[in-house]
Amino acid sequence: MAGGIGSRFWPFSRNNRPKQFLDFFGTGRSLLQMTFDRFRHVVPAENILIVSNVIYKDLILEQLPEIKPSQILLEPNRRNTAPCIAYAVNRIKAITDKANIIVAPSDHLILKEMDFVETIKTGIQFIENNDCLLTLGIKPSRPETGYGYIQIGEGESALRKVKTFTEKPNAELAQIFFETGEFYWNSGIFLWNLQTIDSAFTNLLPEVATKFDEGKGLYNTDKEQDFIDIMYPTCPNISIDYGVLEKSSDVYVLCSDFGWSDLGTWGSLYELSPKDEQQNVTLKCQTMLYESNNNIVALPENKLVVLQGLDGYIVAEADHVLLICKLEDEQKIRQYVNDATVNFSEKFI
């Protein structure tokens, strides 16, 4: 899934080049490319489908020359993860009547890649032999309020039945979740076989399933895109979590620990990045920092940044936009993006 705009990473993440296409760590590979590299350990390149907005087709082909244009499923507009996944499921059904499917966002960071690969292999073996939905749960390292949580059932193995899903909790509830040991972060990475997820859509989210059923016989043909362009905007805007997983009684979680972050905010990037003695993070640019602590500074490579007296700030500049914002207030960035859209030219968004 590669169609989001990553507005919480503004001004780095922009409409014309969202965060999944950016190289945050100077490795020479974007988050999308790193995701593709990871999955090539378990999936042939020709079996990887990328669902994204139509405006990113050329960018995807530029970053992933290994794939064919037919492997990119183009959404005319954004309708959240349930329609995105339903589209991919229907394309796969047109190709084969049996498949094991891994669903993953394109903008996550995985630090322990070989542990991740082994976890995926374990998950595939499970869903190949069990008609259920499987999500990867991440052992929490802190009482994080920015992630959804999964309460796991009793047992000793890493594979558990899911008790409950909880959306992003407040700080007090996140602390309780962290201390009980019964709750894992919801990674947003899912595994299931084709028959199971197809049945789940039909039974649990018919308002989406019936929309895609109208295109039977058109998928994987030259008529597919015309159908999607007309039908897709009429789909409900709904997540796979809310539309399917939270309604199902056959959801399992594979408890995992492979150095995961959804890299959704400047704060998460700050937590993962190397820091100097004053706990400052510098990305790409050069810095001279005086009496400054706990900041993240991200500007183009040819810029020198001089800071004095700042504590706990984001200082980021890209494409004619400079953002200076308290790290603890980074949830306001989406509002800043909305205000900039209203007050100024689209070129700033």
Image (cartoon, rainbow, N blue to C red):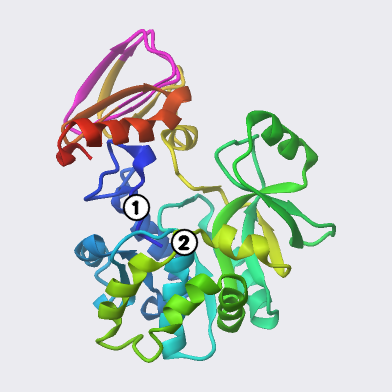
Please, what secondary structure does the residue beneath circle 1 have? helix
Please, what secondary structure does the residue beneath circle 2 have? helix
Q: Residue at 50% of width from left, 76% of height from top?
A: 209
Position of residue 156 in the picture relative to residue 311 (left or right): right
Q: Where residue 313 sits: x, y (%)? A: 39, 20
Q: Where residue 27 sits: x, y (%)? A: 32, 48
Over which residues does the magenta segment extend?
289-315
Instruction: Answer above or below: position of 329 versus 219.
Output: above
Q: Nearer the viewer, mark 2 or mark 1?
A: 2
Q: Where residue 234 sits: x, y (%)? A: 37, 67
Please tell me which of labels 2 and 1 falls first in the chain: 1
- Residue 199 visible in rendering: yes
Residue 296 is tagged as none
Position of residue 147 in the picture relative to residue 159 (left or right): left
**Which quarter of the figure is the C terminus placed in?**
top left
Residue pointed to by mark 1? 20
Amino acid residing under circle 2: Thr
- Neighbours of disc 1 within 10 Å: few (<14), some (14-19), many (20+): many
**Which quarter of the figure is the N terminus placed in?**
bottom left
Instruction: Answer above or below: position of 281 versus 68.
Output: above
Residue 295 among magenta residues: yes
Closer to the camera in the image, 68 or 132: 132
Closer to the camera in the image, 201 or 234: 234
Q: Where residue 280 sits: x, y (%)? A: 41, 22
Residue 293 among magenta residues: yes
Q: Residue at 41% of width from left, 79% of height from top?
A: 47
- How far is mark 2 from mark 1, CA to CA? 16 Å
Q: Residue at 24% of width from left, 50% of height from top?
A: 17
Amino acid residing under circle 1: Gln
Residue pointed to by mark 2? 81
Q: Residue at 62% of width from left, 76% of height from top?
A: 203
